């Protein structure tokens, strides 16, 4: 086997070209090194650089040079992302049981809530944080709990078997406020959940829960 590779004219050509490119790069690096360049030239290069995303005072620090503001803004974004992940949940599913009836027309009437089938005595968790407006008897629901939630909506928990909260009490997302029952106008143990908007209109709880990040693949789960 003759070792012909080193003598290939093409290879030598590539080597030369590569060396020239490398030298050009070195020259560029030297030219753009701030220490080796006049201040005016550096300023010109900065102004000609592709415009970075507008950096609006990262961490509230004004008048930072771009080479500081840029990385700081990136760090700020990373921290904000972590804060979003660590933030307390906005909402949770109220019971482990599956959705047994949706919001909408049903049996010739309009069903203004979302039903979750579960056994009597199963814990009901407050879907969101708020203040208890009322906990007690209610026509049709037997017993209900109503909570004025922090986002301005009202949550209504109907047919409950027993409740553990009282008017004026502060509850947090996930707190156990009552248990599933079969009181009032009910055809079997379940929770009837309603969400009223700020004006008192009954809205579909399903998209409301989904929008707050509650997994809507309902099935048996741990409490
Ligand atoms: Zn219902």
Image (cartoon, rainbow, N blue to C red):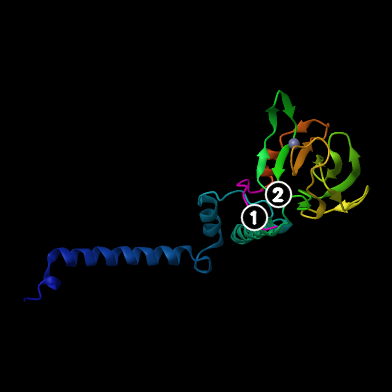
Residue at (86, 50) in percent of width and height: 163
Q: Are the residues at dot 2 and dot 1 in contact (C-beta closer than 8 Å)?
A: yes
Could you tell me residue 177's position as x and y percent? Answer: 83, 52
Report the front residue among 158 and 107: 107
Magenta residues, start to end: 214-223
Residue ID for mark 1: 221
Residue at far top of view: 108
Please tell me how crowded label 1 is: few (under 14), some (14-19), or many (20+) other residues with Cα within 10 Å: few
Magenta span dominant secondary structure: loop
Residue ID for mark 2: 93
Q: Is residue 48 left or right of residue 161?
A: left
Considering the image in quadrants, where does the N terminus appear?
A: bottom left
Q: CA distance from mark 2 to mark 1?
A: 10 Å
Could you tell me residue 65's position as x and y percent? Answer: 63, 59
Residue at far front of view: 187
**Which badge, 2 or 1, is on the more N-terminal residue?**
2
Could you tell me residue 125's position as x and y percent? Answer: 77, 52
- Residue 215 included in the magenta stretch of the image: yes
Q: Is mark 1 within 8 Å of ligand 1?
A: no
Residue at (91, 43) in percent of width and height: 136
Report the front residue among 104 and 69: 104
Q: Which mark is residue 196?
A: none
Report the front residue among 173 and 193: 193
Residue 61 visible at all: no
Q: Is residue 212 above or below residue 86?
A: above
Tag 2's secondary structure?
Answer: loop
Q: Is residue 152 above or below residue 15?
A: above
Q: Is mark 2 within 8 Å of ligand 1?
A: no
- Residue 201 included in the magenta stretch of the image: no
Q: Quadrant of ligand 1?
A: top right
Tag 1's secondary structure?
Answer: loop
Considering the image in quadrants, where does the C terminus appear?
A: bottom right
């Amino acid at each position: 086997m003759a070792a012909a590779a080193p003598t290939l004219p093409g290879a030598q050509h590539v080597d030369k070209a590569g060396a020239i490119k490398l030298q050009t790069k070195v020259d560029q690096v030297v030219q753009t090194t701030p220490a080796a360049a006049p201040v005016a030239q550096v300023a010109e290069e900065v102004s000609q650089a592709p415009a970075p995303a507008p950096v609006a005072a990262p961490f509230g620090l004004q008048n930072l040079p771009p080479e500081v503001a840029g990385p700081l803004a990136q760090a700020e974004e990373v921290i904000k992302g972590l804060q979003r992940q660590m933030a307390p949940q906005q909402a949770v599913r109220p019971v482990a049981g599956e959705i047994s009836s949706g919001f909408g027309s049903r049996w010739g009437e309009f069903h203004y809530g979302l039903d979750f089938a579960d056994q009597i005595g199963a814990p009901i968790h407050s879907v969101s944080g708020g203040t208890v407006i009322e906990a007690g008897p209610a026509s049709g629901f037997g017993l209900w709990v109503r909570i004025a939630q922090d986002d301005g909506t009202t949550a209504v928990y109907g047919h409950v078997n027993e409740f553990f909260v009282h008017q004026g009490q502060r509850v947090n997302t996930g707190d156990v406020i009552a248990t599933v029952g079969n009181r009032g106008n009910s055809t079997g143990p379940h929770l009837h959940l309603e969400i009223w908007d700020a004006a008192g209109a009954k809205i579909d709880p399903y998209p409301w829960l989904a929008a707050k990040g509650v997994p809507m693949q309902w099935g048996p789960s741990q409490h």
